[in-house]
Image (tube, rainbow, N blue to C red):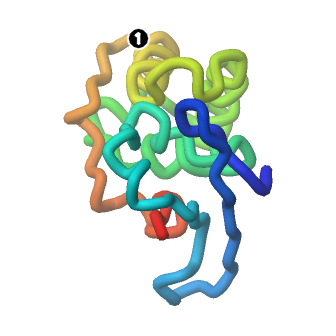
Amino acid sequence: FPDRIQIGATQLPVSYHFEPGSERDGVGVRVPAILVPQLTDDRLGWMVEGLLEEKLLAMIRSLPKQLRRNLVPAPDVAKWVADKMRADFAKKPFMTLACQWLSEKGGEAIRPEHFEGDKLPDPLRIRLE
């Protein structure tokens, strides 16, 4: 849970707020307006390393049942995938690596469109300030 994350060549401050049900619950990153065009899902998808496993677990649970059934027990699979992804943390596109490792573990192709993004809890989405 770092106090700063790297976006391009810039270190941006990170805040953490624990207040379930609040709009502020989760991880916030303060971004100067001039840097907003540089933000990409490839980096923001990573959030912070301390939440990687929890985010992957929520993603697994959002998959259609026919894909999810090969990824059980989901907490163990999330841990396995997180361990594989940590070597490339924020160096490669998050969704590309998540799909790669989940596909390998489940034995079936998993693509970004398979995930139901609206099922991802708000605290597992990075909040830009």
- Residue located 70% across and 24% down the image: 86
What residue type is disc 1 on?
A: Gly
Question: How many dots with numbers?
Answer: 1
- Residue located 48% across and 60% down the image: 32
Q: Is residue 127 above or below residue 100?
A: below
Local crowd size for mark 1, using a 10 Å CA cut-off: few (<14), some (14–19), many (≥20): few
Q: Is mark 1 on a helix, strand or loop?
A: loop
Q: In this view, does 90 lie above or below 33?
A: above
Q: Is residue 23 above or below residue 49?
A: below
Closer to the camera, 76 or 82?
82
Which residue is the extreme one toward the right? 2
- Residue located 70% across and 41% down the image: 49
Which residue is the extreme one toward the front? 34
Q: Is residue 103 above or below residue 59?
A: above
Residue 20 in view in this figure: yes
Residue position for label 1: 107
Indicate left or right for 93 with 14 as reference.
Answer: left
Residue 53 in view in this figure: no
Image location of residue 73, percent across then percent down: 59, 37
Indicate left or right for 93 with 109 as reference.
Answer: right
- Residue located 66% across and 50% down the image: 51
Image location of residue 126, percent across then percent down: 50, 58
Image location of residue 13, percent across then percent down: 68, 59
Closer to the camera, 77 or 82?
82
